[in-house]
């Protein structure tokens, strides 16, 4: 199962150098399970050929309002009728102006006017064009008309200038689109989370850590953000992109993670501990690299690290706490023990051999009502299941207090 399975997207490509990124987006949307149909403006087709989009989407590309490939000659109606969303990437200043004023002088703008599905646009233009009062007026009008504006980002631009107007990256647009279809189960909530491993230094080049990749925590952070939450992700060292819309606080050691969590959790309604926190740290971290002495292994003394989840759960005004339990055997009994010892309303249990490092996971949710297994799936899909369950329990909890 994939995040956009069963979704039919009409992708409009207008004239701008960022049109080349739309080609990558078609690939990403297809990988996420969407069926993509591309409509180009004449100017869009000057930057990238329709053939490129046809090859990537596997469907004919539409340009001409008089195209007679549809028997009824109504491609402007037919294409949008069966679409779950219309997405314009890149959206030029000219296209935004036409949409804001209801102008329909080519297939794409006519399609937008005739649509009965949501419209999302990712503007891309020179920073001065973006800041021009006319463009800003048009964008405000589009927002008022219920059109979703994705970005733009700030950064270096094709014209050599630096500023706002750069198109959001295809990966971020894909995430935003997936989020668009998600129910906003956590709207108005702040979620503080931990993810990844921690790293406890022995000396400047060695340390104690574990093989957590951070994939489960990052997928869950993304799912919470897509469900409408404000997400603050306290992350150990991982090699992952921060999910779109998530605030990431990078740390190394368990003590740094503990401090970063405690500084933020007071304002949160939910805390989720996904990190594989090192339970112990070397009592001392050597200033210089420990030298090898022939025939003699160094003895490293360890101290206990704080149990972040237990500390948060025992706060006087504790947020709704979700713990993870990674076990190599007897998952049910160990997960339940962790749940009752730390007095957690929800524990997500997984076997280390199932969930650590890989892209998929098999989890069981443990709460007061018992155990709720979720089917094995990519971590992104598993995360949606966890968010749905968490949102139901949170609503019940809030109703009680
Ligand atoms: O990162 P991935 O490669 O995607 O792998 C995902 C995962 C297997 C790491 C993840 O799904 C998971 O199970 N995370 C919890 C791992 C763990 O350390 O579990 P634990 O049983 O040791 O800890 C129980 C709970 O207490 C966890 O929520 C943990 O974050 C928290 N904890 C533990 C120790 C500590 N000092 N502080 C904590 O907050």
Image (tube, rainbow, N blue to C red):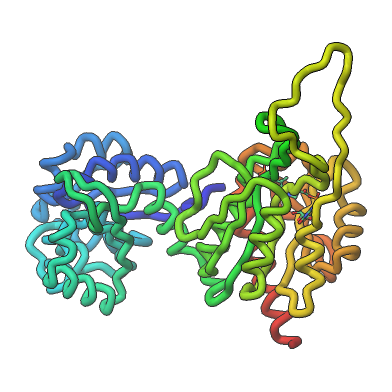
Farthest top residue in view: 294
| Image position, residue 186 (x, y; %) | 57, 72
Image quarter in which the C terminus is found? bottom right
Farthest front residue in view: 287
- Numbered label tally: 0
| Image position, residue 128 (x, y; %) | 14, 60
Nearest the eye: 202 or 163: 202
Based on the displayed image, in which of its 4 quarters is residue 223 positioned?
A: bottom right
Above or below 53: residue 95: below
Based on the displayed image, in which of its 4 quarters is residue 57 positioned?
A: top left
Based on the displayed image, in which of its 4 quarters is residue 396 positioned?
A: bottom right
Nearest the eye: 332 or 376: 332
Taking the image as shown, residue 14 lies to the left or right of residue 321, namely left
| Image position, residue 82 (x, y; %) | 33, 60
Taking the image as shown, residue 357 lies to the left or right of residue 295, namely left
Taking the image as shown, residue 230 lies to the left or right of residue 68, namely right
Above or below 318: residue 226: above
Please report the residue visible at 9 percent of the width from the left and 48 percent of the height from the top.
42
Taking the image as shown, residue 101 lies to the left or right of residue 13, namely left
Please report the residue visible at 71 percent of the width from the left and 74 percent of the height from the top.
319
Residue 69 can be seen, yes or no = no
Residue 48 can be seen, yes or no = yes
Please report the residue visible at 74 percent of the width from the left and 79 percent of the height from the top.
317
Nearest the eye: 196 or 53: 196
| Image position, residue 364 (x, y; %) | 77, 54
């Amino acid at each position: 199962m994939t995040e956009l399975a069963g979704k039919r997207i009409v992708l409009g490509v207008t004239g701008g150098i960022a049109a080349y990124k739309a080609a990558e987006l078609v690939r990403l949307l297809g990988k996420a399970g969407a069926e993509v149909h591309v409509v180009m403006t004449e100017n869009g087709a000057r930057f990238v050929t329709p053939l490129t989009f046809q090859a990537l989407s596997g469907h004919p590309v539409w340009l001409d309002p008089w195209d007679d490939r549809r028997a009824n000659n109504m491609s402007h109606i037919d294409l949008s009728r069966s679409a779950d969303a219309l997405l314009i990437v890149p959206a030029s200043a000219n296209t935004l102006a036409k949409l804001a004023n209801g102008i329909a002088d080519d297939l794409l703008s006519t399609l937008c006017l005739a649509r009965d599905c949501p419209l999302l646009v990712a503007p891309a233009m020179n920073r001065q064009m973006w800041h021009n009062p006319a463009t800003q007026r048009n964008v405000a009008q589009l927002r008022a008309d219920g059109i979703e504006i994705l970005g733009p980002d700030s950064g270096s631009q094709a014209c050599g200038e630096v500023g706002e107007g750069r198109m959001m990256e295809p990966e971020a647009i894909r995430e935003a689109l997936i989020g668009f279809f998600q129910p906003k189960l956590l709207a108005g909530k702040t979620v503080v989370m931990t993810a990844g491993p921690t790293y406890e230094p022995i000396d400047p080049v060695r340390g104690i850590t574990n093989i957590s990749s951070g994939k489960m925590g990052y997928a869950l952070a993304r799912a919470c953000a897509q469900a409408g939450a404000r997400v603050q992700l306290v992350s150990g060292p991982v090699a992952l992109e921060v999910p779109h819309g998530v605030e990431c606080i990078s740390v190394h050691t368990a003590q740094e993670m503990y401090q970063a969590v405690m500084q933020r959790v007071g304002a949160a309604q939910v805390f989720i501990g996904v990190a594989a926190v090192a339970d112990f740290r070397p009592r001392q971290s050597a200033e210089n690299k420990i030298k090898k002495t022939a025939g003699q292994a160094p003895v490293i003394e360890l101290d206990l690290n704080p149990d972040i989840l237990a500390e948060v759960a025992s706060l006087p005004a504790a947020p709704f706490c979700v713990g993870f339990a990674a076990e190599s055997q007897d998952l049910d009994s160990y997960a339940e023990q962790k749940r009752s010892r730390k007095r957690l309303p929800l524990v997500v249990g997984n076997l280390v051999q199932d969930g650590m490092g890989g892209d998929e996971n098999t989890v069981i949710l443990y709460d007061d009502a018992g155990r709720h297994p979720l089917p094995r799936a990519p971590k992104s899909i598993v995360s949606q299941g966890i968010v749905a369950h968490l949102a139901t329990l949170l609503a019940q909890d809030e109703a009680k207090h």
